[in-house]
Image (cartoon, rainbow, N blue to C red):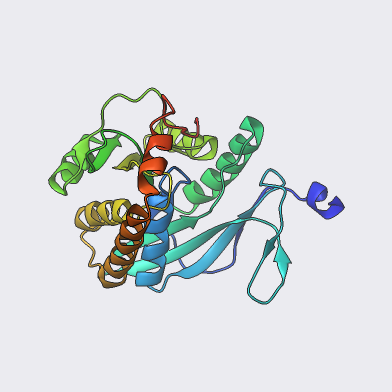
Amino acid sequence: MKERMGLETRVNLFDAQSLEGAVFIEGTPTAGAAGMLAVNYLRAAYDAKQVGEVVSPHFPQISLIDEEGIASLPKMELYLAKNKDVKMLLLSRGFPVESNEGSYEVAKKLYEVLSEKGVKEYIVLASGRISGNGGVFVSATNLDDTKKLLDAGAKRSPSLENLPVDRTTAFLMLFFARDHKRVTLLISDTISYMPDHMAAKRLLEVVSRYLGIELDFTILDKEIERQNRLMQEIEQLGLMGKQLAGEEKPSKEPFYIG
């Protein structure tokens, strides 16, 4: 605990590869986890190499145990993936940062490093209940990017009372937009609070068309089939109705407020 309290928020880059011109893509932790699933799939599909990490005392006060039984503190990890002429800097994390002060500090330090390294575009992948009819909704600071994403299959995002992002992502979006850099928020519509692989695939379909990258969905399609079979089995056991009834009770989506 003392080590934890003495820890400072740091962005550690430990690879000499250039990040100039890389597209920064984050899968933010939201209901359905579609963004996180999508980023993890990009990592695996392109055999992405870890190039950095973010550590902070503002991260959740827990210890993570790996497959070898070694405990470590939560951290954000940065991976570099390449396809054709496109470089993607992927941010992987499975937790929100709760405090406003901590979120600001983490976002500010990460943004300063990315800005120094020449990263000028930020794509946020999220999920939440928007229309209940599926689809991917887009909101972007650049009109040309919006048009391109609409051509890639996205829909214009309706006005939302709360964005499905946590404070850290909200601050990052603010810093990029403040300095006239390109920011895009893609929200995959989902009615589930469970990991939604189909919602993740919809995000990836739009992103791959937008960036002009090739992506094999074979493994993801198998996971979607497995999930569908599981849901059918649950339905046959008579549990699905109870789950859906429970999901209808909240009047609003429990978004992380940015």
- Spot occupied by residue 142 in the image (x, y as percentages of width and height): 26, 36
Q: Quadrant of residue 101?
A: top right
Depth check: give the residue in front, 93 or 227.
227
Query: From what the image shows, is residue 237 above or below residue 121?
Result: below
Depth check: give the residue in front, 48 or 126.
126
Kindly tell me whether residue 20 is visible in this rendering.
no
Q: How many marks?
A: 0
**Which residue is rendered at x = 62% and y = 31% of the image?**
100
**Which residue is rendered at x = 13% and y = 46% of the image?**
151
Q: Give the residue at the far bottom of this rendering.
A: 68
Q: Give the residue at the far right of this rendering.
A: 2
Kindly tell me whether residue 138 is visible in this rendering.
yes
Query: From what the image shows, is residue 142 above or below residue 87?
Result: above
- Spot occupied by residue 232 in the image (x, y as percentages of width and height): 30, 58
Depth check: give the residue in front, 56 or 73.
73
Q: Quadrant of residue 46?
A: bottom left
**Which residue is rendered at x = 25% and y = 67% of the image?**
215
- Spot occupied by residue 3 in the image (x, y as percentages of width and height): 83, 54
- Spot occupied by residue 166 in the image (x, y as percentages of width and height): 51, 37
Q: Quadrant of residue 89?
A: bottom left
**Which residue is rendered at x = 43% and y = 44% of the image?**
193
